[in-house]
Amino acid sequence: MAKTPLSMEPTGWFQVAWSAEIEVGAVVRMTYFGQEMVAWRSASGRVSVFDAYCEHLGAHLGYGGHVEGENLECPFHGWQWNSEGRNVCIPYEARPNKGRRIRSHPVVERNESIWIWYDKHGRAPYFEVPDIFTAFGDDADAARRYYPPVPAAIRCWRGLELHPQYVLENGVDFAHFLFVHKTPFMPEFTRHDFDGPVSYVDFTIAFEEGKTLENAGSGVYSINAGLGCSVTRSWGMIENRTMPAVTPVDEHTCDVRFTVWIGRKPGEENATGMTPYGQTMADLVIEQFAADVEIWSHQRYSDPPALSRKEFAGFTALRRWAEQFYPDGEDLGTDPRMPHSGAIVPLHPSAHVTSA
């Protein structure tokens, strides 16, 4: 892939792990945004993500660092750091060093996943990570109507040469459905809402052979919170919700994660894990997403693109919206000092549909 001209340091929430990957007491090494980091879970279950190096003498906390209660202890001299990155204990001194602090990234644990907030300029979060159920108008108990996605319905592609914006542009690219996903017709977009940092894109689509736009009766709702976090809900077809997440690793590559929730088949309401039916449906959804990944990972960013007349409005609106997340972009009517300006507002009524 030709190196993208887009910054690989966009502002927003980015998935760095699934929750199950970081158990109580675990210290996990990772690299994102060109920085070495460690994620760790305290005895009470709280997840923190730090820059990897101890502020004392620079030991890497991912090599021998360990959790002591609610703190992370450095393997070199036993200095302990709390979830905010503040030194709370020097074992051979009467007082901690209050003047030094390890950079601690804001963390949200939601949708079976761990998200960090990244902003090159150090701004605090000003929009939310959407909950894949309540964001579409469901109650918090809706998750029980779906098979648990982890570990059976997740996939991770590491170190791909692509950009988060490619994935978001896929959401307004109606023409690719016919050629990549072999749908019987090109979808019709019923909503493009690009106000503020959270956007909403809805479209009518079907995958069954013989269906037409006029008799489809099915579609997809999607919510995009910045460039790194998206959630979708299908209606009128096999009940599923998906969560693609693309996180920059360095100036050239990203990790891509994909999580799929499949609605339970009648009679399997009490199944504790994934069933053969659920696995089959999840694999079909993942197969469709993997076809997109194959394209994205060999794509060159075209600017300006050679858009057709029908494509112009969607792509232009999305690219304009995306500018606000880059270090030199401008906010589009969003005040970073007002977290509620990026609230996720349910726009669709809950409508649970299960198809066998």
Image (cartoon, rainbow, N blue to C red):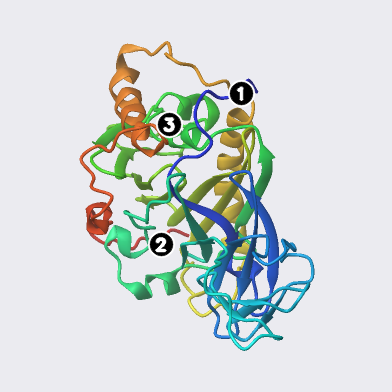
Question: Hey, which quadrant is residue 86 in on the image?
Answer: bottom right
Q: Within 10 Å of the Cα at label 2, are there few (<14), some (14-19), or many (20+) other Cα atoms?
A: some
Q: Pick whichever, 98 or 353, lies toward us.
A: 98
In-image side of 54 versus 240 (left or right): right
Going by the numbered disc 3, the residue's amino acid type is Glu
Q: Nearer the viewer, mark 3 or mark 1?
A: 1
Query: Which residue is the site of mark 1?
Result: 3
- Closer to the eye: label 2 or 1: 1
**Distance in Å between CA atoms under marks 2 and 1:** 43 Å
Residue 110 in view (yes/no): no
Q: Amino acid at mark 1?
A: Lys
**Which element type, helix, strand or loop, lies under badge 1?**
loop
According to the picture, the residue beneath numbered tag 3 turns out to be 169
Residue 80 falls in image quadrant = bottom right
The image position of residue 184, as x and y in percent, is 44, 30
Q: Which circle's residue, 3 or 1, is located before the other in the chain? A: 1
- Is residue 68 placed above or below 273 in the rendered structure? below
Looking at the image, which residue is at 71% across and 66% down? 61
Q: Are marks 3 and 2 in contact (CB under 8 Å)?
A: no
